[in-house]
Image (cartoon, helix red, strand yellow):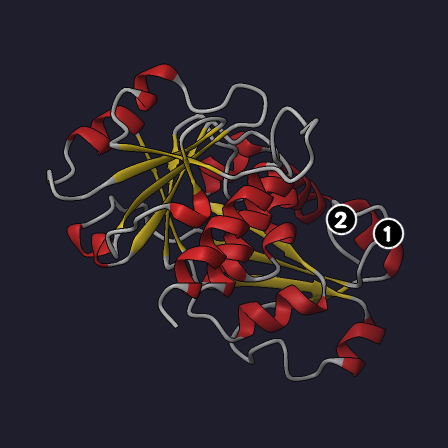
Amino acid sequence: MLSKNKIQFIRQLHHKKYRQQQRMFIVEGTRMMEELANSTWQTVEVIATEKWLVQNPKLVPEYVPLHEAPEKDLARLTTFTTAPGVLAVVRMPAEAAPGADILEDYVVMLDGISDPGNLGTILRTADWFGFKNVVCSMDTVELFNPKVVQATMGALFRVNVFYVESVEFLQQLPDHIPVTGAMLAGESLPKMDFAGKGIFVIGSESHGIRPEVERLLTQRLFIPAWHPERPESLNASIATALICYELRRREI
């Protein structure tokens, strides 16, 4: 049985304020525990049901404090509709600024992405296509939001995510680094000439790339629609996936 203090502590981590204060966040489910076990991130403690522990004896390192709890306690702690049987408290890595080395490959930059599912899916996509660095504007949804964490399916353990002041970051780039924005008008993606590296900016679905960031673009990219009465815009994560695919396809 978990103590009231332990239950209260974990439930507080559902909220950004407390995650930032404690520098910890929650990981849930067997798939995420597998990804966590294969990462270098620090697991603070694990709470799991007896059934889950019997089925997954190798996913909790011996040095990690382990609390066995009934399903009713997990149900009070989970951010899921149905408790998955295991929950881990994980320490956030130290915050870092992006270094010049991230410019050795393409970098995905997100401008005002507010939907947790979109951010998680974008990180999962970046991971799939081998893009190691994603730069986010300060108003992009928090990386450790439980919905973001789950949507990454473990990609957050492999992709470097930096939060920056967008304009300042772009203004400090070397002149030879292209900054391409995904827009509703510009050079068609299939015809775009890529430099082998650069920044690709994806804006929010509702507002697009903000004007102060758009002014710093060196080129504009358009993903053509095949339907004559095209929708207003593509989903941000789908647009990111199409661009990432095209970039890697040209390297084959």
Q: Position of residue 248 (x, y in %)?
A: 41, 63
Report whether 128 appears left or right of 193.
right
Dot 2: within a 10 Å radius of its alpha carbon, few (fewer than 14), some, or many (20 or more) residues?
many
- Name the quadrant of the N terminus: bottom right
Task: Give x and y (percent) for residue 166.
Answer: 30, 28
Q: Quadrant of residue 174?
A: top left
Name the quadrant of the C terminus.
bottom left
Q: Is residue 251 visible?
A: yes
Depth order, front residue of 185/28:
185
Query: Is residue 13 shown to the viewer in this render?
Result: no
Kindly identify which numbered label has been placed on residue 82. 1
Name the residue at 67% across, 49% down: 6
* Badge 1 amino acid: Thr
The answer to which image quadrant residue 32 occupies is: bottom right
Q: Residues within 10 Å of mark 1 (few under 14, many from 20)?
A: few
Q: Which residue corresponds to mark 2?
A: 78
Return the residue found at the far left. 175
State yes or no: discs 2 and 1 in contact (Cβ < 8 Å).
yes
Note whether 60 is above or below 106 in the view shown: below
Q: Please report the residue visible at 29 percent of the width from the left and 33 percent of the height from the top.
A: 219
Image point 68% across, 30% down: which residue? Answer: 228
Q: Where residue 14 sits in the image (x, y, percent)?
A: 64, 38
User: At 55% across and 33% down in the image, what residue appears?
Assistant: 16
Residue 143: give x, y in percent of width and height: 50, 43
Q: For the residue marked with disc 2, what is the amino acid? A: Thr
Please, is residue 145 above or below residue 103 in the view? above
Q: Secondary structure at mark 2?
A: loop
Look at discs 2 and 1 and give the one toward the viewer: 1
